[in-house]
Each structure stands twice: as C-alpha cells, then as structure tokens.
Amino acid sequence: MQRHTLSESHSSGWLFCRPAWFLLAGVLLLAACSQPNSGVALSGATMGTTWHVTYLPGPQTAPPEQVQASLEGLLVSVNDSMSTWQVDSEISRFNRGVVGSWVPVSGHFARVMAEALRIGERSGGAYDVTVGPLVELWGFGPVQPRMELPQTSAIEAARNRVGQQFIEFDGELQRLRRLRKVELDLSSIAKGYAVDVLANALSERGIDSFLVEVGGEMRVAGNSPRGDAWRIAVERPEPGARAVALGIALEDIAVATSGDYRNYFELEGRRYSHSIDPRTGYPVAHDLVSVTVLADDCMTADGWATALTVLGADEALALAEAEGLAVYLMRRDGERIVPLYSSAFAPWLEQSTPTQ
C-alpha cells in the first residue's frame, strides 16, 4: 500500500489556502515578512498543527507578547473543549459518558455543535461529526494505516456507530446527550472555530487589519501589510507538486479548503480517499478533488468545505447554489483540472488572478 502525504515548499507572494491538515508551517510568515511593512507576526502550535497571526498594530495596541499570551490562552480553552487527543477534554468526557444522560457543555462546545448539526442536516448527512469509527476503520485515524481493505461486516458494524440523529442537542439549556453509543469528533470544524475565536479577540483589542490561520483555515480583515487586500492562493490539486490555481484578493472574509488529493492510499491499483461518506461507509469515489468555501466566519467555511467534498462536484454545486454559498470547486476530467464555481463566488473572481 502506498500512502501519500505532502512535501515542504512555498510560493512567493501568495498565502497558500490548502486542505487544513497540510498547510506548511512558515508559509504565512514567509509571505508576510517578505513585505516592507510586515506588521506583527505571531505563531505557535495547537490542535496538532500550527497557527499564525499577522496584524497591523495601532498606537494603543498591547505589546506583541501580551497579544500572543492572550491568543494562546484562548487556543488552550478551545483545545480543552474539543480535543479528542486529551483524555480530560470536554469532548472526551462526553464520549465516555453514559448513553441517555444529559451533559452540560461550554459555550465553545455549544456554538460548534449547533453549526455542525446544522451543516449535517442541510447536507443530507454528507457531513456528520460522528463519522470517526469509519475514518479509523479505513486507516485515516490515529491508528496505523491499513494494509488491507476492511471487510463489509466491519464497515456495517462501524456504520451502526455513526449518525448525528443519535445526538440530541438542547441549545437553549446548552446541553446534549447521546441516544446511542456514538462518539463526537469536531476536528473537521474546530480549527475553523478557533480561527474565529482569535479573529474576534483581535477585533476586541481594536486591531482591524489581520490574518488569522489555524491548520490551513483562514480569516482576514482590513488591509495586508502591503496596504491592499490580503492575497490568498488556492492550490492546484497536483499530487507531488505545488502550484497555484487561483489567487484571490480578500477582505473581511474567511476561507477554508478541503481536498482528497494529498491524503489517500492506493491498494491493488485503486485509490482510496480520506474523505469518507457517512451515508455509505466508504471513501468517496468521484472526480471532485478540491473545494474552497468563503464565508463570514471560518467555522461555517470549514464545515461546508468538508461536506461538499463528500458530495461530489454536481451535488456540491447544486447545494452551494441552494444555500447561497461562495464556493470554488476543481474536478478532474482525465488529465485536466476543470474549475467550477457558484454564483456567490463569481464577484470574487473579478479580483482574482488565474494561473492555470
């Protein structure tokens, strides 16, 4: 079995927007620091990945070390709520809890859960935060990669432990409970939420020009250090290479990209994507290779990018139109990469730089 991951590189002048788990450390800082007025650049580690913030300070802005400490504290609180790697996190305690019992949850958890369930419902189950057993079964979880395909019986057994309909959420009382022994994994949306938490914290400090990135998900506001809009590069989906498909000038918007061309395995001549369809229990097998979503908040962009990747190009574009989502898709047609986009994305193309 051949397992594919990413090699390190960067592209001058553009900030790469790429699948969340594969943004390379240092790309944002390299791009920002190459400018004459680079502002302040902060970075660190969180959620098993990296985070970067670049902002333009004002005369009353606190020293960078104070801003960094504040942001790191917020990231710790999000991680303490939603990390499945921490045995004492809020989500880990919930997953170990008694089926049928109501569990009070924090504001962080409640906000993310509400949006995750909404996207799951609107996507017809293509997005499901209980999909973890299937992800692990196919070898894309924390366990070792599979050397053979799972048996049909194992897939069906895992599917019996998947389904957001078995999660009951009471937003008013900020609590939830399981109706069956399913487990939550919010990693497909938590990084986007963390971006929003940091962005809101910067705004509350009076900082109105910034870029926030956590694990590849981004949100920008105001102007870049160059004095113009932030420039984000959408990667062309080419395994083993790194090239820009589209450059977009962005202001006051969040962006998330999901794709299946970097994380997959090949067995007996067939490719198996890390994107698992919760409705079937199998990896997706369509020609959609990259989804980029723009939204007012990064949590929404993050969740929808995952959902649309599962659906495939035609269904994804139709749903994006129905939901009014700004979406840029790339599908593979033989040796060609064919771009598609929703009506809501069209205005952003007027400020874009195609490079194909």
Image (cartoon, helix red, strand yellow):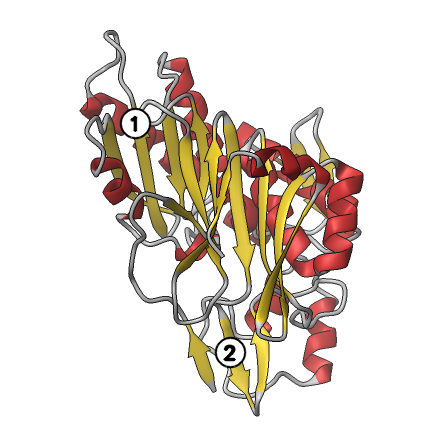
- Crowding near the residue tagged with mark 1, few <14, some 14–19, many ≥20 C-alpha atoms within 10 Å: some
Towards the viewer: 255 or 31: 31
Q: Is residue 78 above or below residue 24?
A: above
Q: Is residue 112 left or right of residue 154?
A: left
Picture coordinates of residue 192, whole percent (x, y) = 50, 40
**Residue occupying the point 37% across, 44% down:** 15
Q: What percent of the width, then of the height, locates residue 66? A: 22, 22
The residue under label 1 is which amino acid type? Arg
Mark 2 or mark 1, whichever is nearer to me: 1
Of 208 and 336, which appears nearest the observer? 336
Q: Nearer the viewer, residue 239 or 182?
A: 239
Mark 2 Cα within 10 Å, few/some/many (few <14, many 20+)? many
Q: Position of residue 254 (x, y in %)?
A: 52, 34
> What residue is pinned by disc 1?
226
- The residue lying at 41 percent from left, 14 percent from top is 204
Q: Amino acid at mark 2?
A: Phe
Up the image or down, 203 lies above or below 294; here it is above
Residue 217 as seen in the image, left or right of residue 7: right
Q: Nearer the viewer, residue 135 or 207?
A: 207
Residue at the spot of label 2: 265
Residue 140 is labelled as: none
Query: Is 63 left, or right, of 355 in this rendering?
Result: left
Tag 2 secondary structure = strand
Q: Is residue 126 visible?
A: yes
Mark 2 vs mark 1: which is more N-terminal?
1
